[in-house]
Image (spheres, rainbow, N blue to C red):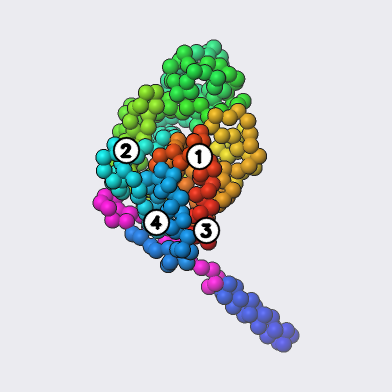
Amino acid sequence: MIRYCLILIIILFISCNKEEGTAQETPPQPSMYFPPLSGNVWETTTPESLNWNISEADTLYDYLETRGTRAFIILKDGKIVIEKYWGNDIQNTSPFTQDSNWYWASAGKTLTALLVGIAQEEGILNINNKTSDYLGLNWTSLPSEKEELILIKHQLTMTTGLNYDVASLDCTDSSCLEYGTDAGQQWYYHNAPYTLLEQVVSNASGMTYNNFTDEKVENKIGMSGSWVTLGYNNVYWSTPRDAARYGLLLLNNGVWDETTVLADTSYVDAMTNSSQALNPSYGYLTWLNGKSSIRLPGFNLSFNTSLSLNAPSDMYAAMGKNGQFINVVPSENMVVIRMGEAPDNDLVPIEFHDEMWGLINNLTN
């Protein structure tokens, strides 16, 4: 009996040591860096310290520069690894720098999605409520029973069902918003219902959209951009570093350092995961990689591929006209920013985006 007990104690001792050894072998998670809310201080790290293949950097830079890129930033664990600028500012009067402003185009949609989530968290709207609760009746030209089917969630997911065969997909006049099919039954990249989300938030909050953005996001993470009305569209402008700040906020799931910008993790998850089955590559106004199929702007059909074969499968992105990209890669603790002119003649620069990621892989692998 004594011999049996001794054997049992030895076995337990060895098992405990193995468990402790396993725990010690787990590498520590890198801490996330957040730059100060004001000033130009932003910690950097080098590609060499990350064991990146620096010999591939010039090939990436040449590719970006020859395709109209103005700004390119890579963050790793919140720190700047690469920050490059080319060409002139939007007025073409002086060199483009870290302080130059550029338009986000539809990359601003993802910022709007976050603002809607903040408004919901504050209890001033609910995405499962009818849009007419905030815009009033007859905000479309639909019969009332069809208009009442459209919820804020449908605006977030491009599934309002509004007719997309119209003269202008940007027009937000009620006469331009015609019946196509019942809400939730089709996915189409229709800009006007998205744009009206800004009025939804303003009406619900009693604040201008710029003021709401300033108070709820910009002041908390050090951004200094602004929404500018251009025709029917309301376009966000900022510096590339502001875009990087926003990407870092998304990477950290709505939390900036010790400040929670959006505490509703279920909403953040919904933003960055498939929001419906019609286009699994789309969350709440956010593009998703690694899905089995995708519907692209301007097309009423599905392609059996993912957003980018070269990018990490868990990447999600804010993407805008002419190649405005905020790419977030949770598995790599990485944010990639590209701003600039159209890299090619494609309606959507998906091929450019994928080739860019192929060159990033050559650098980082």
For mark 4, what is the residue? 82
Q: Could you say whether the residue bearing mark 2 is in a helix, strand or loop?
A: loop
Q: Position of residue 19 (x, y in %)?
A: 60, 73
Residue 300, by quadrant, is top right
What type is the residue that disc 1 sits on?
A: Pro
Q: What secondary structure is the magenta-colored segment mainly?
A: loop
Q: Position of residue 227 (x, y in %)?
A: 34, 33
What is the quadrant of the N terminus in the image? bottom right
Distance in Å between CA atoms under marks 3 and 1 = 20 Å
For mark 3, what is the residue? 362
Circle 2 crowding by C-alpha within 10 Å: few under 14, some 14–19, many from 20: some
Which residue shows up at 41% across the image and 48% down it?
65
Residue interval drawn in magenta: 23-42
- Whether residue 26 is in magenta: the answer is yes
- Whether residue 10 is in magenta: the answer is no
Q: Residue furthest bottom?
A: 3
